[in-house]
Amino acid sequence: MKAKLDVHLKNAKQNKLTTWTANGMCENCHYMCYPEKFEIHLFEDIYDRFCNCEITNCISKLEMMKREIAREKHAIIRRERTLIYELKRIGVRMEKVKEKEEKLKSVSFVAKMKLAFENVKENDRYKSIRTQAGRALKQIGFFKNYNVKERKNANYRADQ
């Protein structure tokens, strides 16, 4: 019996109120009150927002603790929902990045095809195929600098 009481007393002592979230409304004057602890900003009450009754009539400590736990629980649930939403958005972004990566592979494929089109343009038997290869080479010309490591610097100044 004593052991059970000790366990419950230990658990009860661990529950503490935080002053900034644990305040109720005084039923006498309908202002916020926190009668448990002396706080200078509540005592001075510059903006007339807190209860100044000699005996306050507000919710009990137990109700304040329950309300604080419920508020914390809702905050955790809200945070969990936002993280799940963010994970879904990250999944969509990852799919887009993978799609871009696949498209980027096609640029290197096009650059490799340049030699084949040059050979077809010069050595093919039919003129229509040679002209098609020439048009394809003009389209591939846009990608010719994609694999070059050394490029001219557009921001170079000779006077430095």
Image: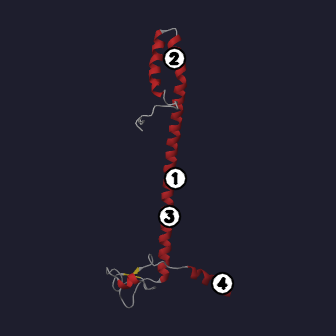
Q: Secondary structure at mark 1?
A: helix
Q: Sequence order check: which comes first, mark 1 or mark 4?
A: 4
- Within 10 Å of disc 2 (Cα), the crowding (few <14, some 14-19, many 20+) is some
- Can residue 2 be seen in the rendering of this structure? yes
Q: Amino acid at mark 1?
A: Leu
- Can residue 1 be seen in the rendering of this structure? no
Q: Which residue is mark 2?
A: 118
Viewer-nearest of labels 3 and 2? 2
Label 1 to label 4, Cα distance in Å? 44 Å
Q: Sequence order check: which comes first, mark 1 or mark 3?
A: 3
Q: Sequence order check: which comes first, mark 1 or mark 2?
A: 1
Q: Which residue is mark 3?
A: 77
Q: Quadrant of the C terminus?
A: top left
Determine the residue positioned at 54% across, 20% down. 115
Determine the residue positioned at 54% across, 33% down. 105
Viewer-nearest of labels 1 and 2? 2
- Within 10 Å of disc 4 (Cα), the crowding (few <14, some 14-19, many 20+) is few
Determine the residue positioned at 48% across, 54% down. 85
Label 2 to label 4, Cα distance in Å? 90 Å
Determine the residue positioned at 33% across, 85% down. 29
User: Does the CB distance between marks 3 and 2 fall below 8 Å?
Assistant: no
Viewer-nearest of labels 1 and 3? 1
Q: Nearer the viewer, residue 77 or 144?
A: 144
Q: Which residue is mark 4?
A: 4
Q: Amino acid at mark 3?
A: Ile
Q: Which residue is mark 1?
A: 87
Q: Amino acid at mark 2?
A: Glu
User: Does the CB distance between marks 1 and 3 fall below 8 Å?
Assistant: no
Q: Secondary structure at mark 4?
A: helix
